[in-house]
Image (cartoon, rainbow, N blue to C red):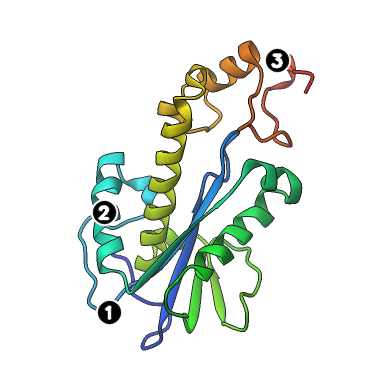
Amino acid sequence: MSLKKFYIKNVLEAGTDEAGRGCLAGPVVAAAVILPKSFEHPLLNDSKKLTEKQRNLLRPIIEKEAIAYGVAFISEEKIDEINILQASILGMHKSIDKLSVVPEHIIVDGNKFKPYKNIPHKTVVKGDAKYMSIAAASVLAKTYRDEFMMKINKEFPNYDWLNNKGYPTKKHRAAIAKFGPNKYHRKTFKLLPEQLKLDL
């Protein structure tokens, strides 16, 4: 199925999405993108369906050709303070704040959002596999987050973030059991299964 260009035609429409919601460590990263009507790219799809190489190839193309884009990071401390859903929505709002032009309509990946200013919005389940602007936002959110996780991997190389990017893999959980959580871990998340419980 090919991606649709717009939910509403002939308005300035921004798509927004986040990456890192299910991770045990690191920030949640959100992006918002307004694409021109003429935008086409055969690779563009939901970032989860793309390889790392494809996402990294798409990122500069999206950034160059978008009418506007914004990327926002919400820290693990903030996630622990307000919860992951609220942090994801906050990130999307902040990424829309960063757009150099104000959208007339917003399409959001998922089924939860809070109104942004007085701009109408539509939530779309699996929107990153349906609309170009949401797919483009998913690519930016994922590449910026992966880049950050690779950077902090140098600080804490024991957790295999280079490969798992903070997601709850066996290797990641084994490292938490062995070395304990570090400052980038989300303390309100279930870092280990019951049998490997840690006293935080």
Q: Residue 149's x, y, as percent? A: 46, 35
Crowdedness of circle 3 by 10 Å Cα count: few (<14), some, many (20+)?
few
Q: Which three-letter amino acid code belongs to the residue tagged 2?
A: Leu
Q: Which mark is residue 196?
A: 3
Residue 21 in the image: above or below residue 102:
above
Q: Which mark is residue 5?
A: none
Cα–Cα span, label 3 and label 1: 52 Å
- Residue positioned 58% across, 41% down in the render: 22
- Residue positioned 65% across, 54% down in the render: 87
Cα–Cα span, label 1 and label 2: 17 Å
- Residue positioned 72% across, 43% down in the render: 80
Crowdedness of circle 1 by 10 Å Cα count: few (<14), some, many (20+)?
few
Residue at image mark 2:
58
Residue 1 visible, this angle: no
Residue at image mark 1:
37
Judged from this view, the residue extending furthest toward the front is: 155
Judged from this view, the residue extending furthest toward the right is: 199
The tag earlier along the polypeptide, 2 or 3, is: 2
Cα–Cα span, label 2 and label 3: 40 Å
Residue 72 in the image: above or below residue 197:
below
Q: Is residue 8 left or right of residue 166?
A: left
Q: Residue 48's x, y, as percent? A: 39, 46
Q: Nearer the viewer, mark 2 or mark 3?
A: 2
Q: Residue 133 falls in which quadrant of the image?
A: bottom left
Q: Are marks 1 and 2 in contact (CB under 8 Å)?
A: no
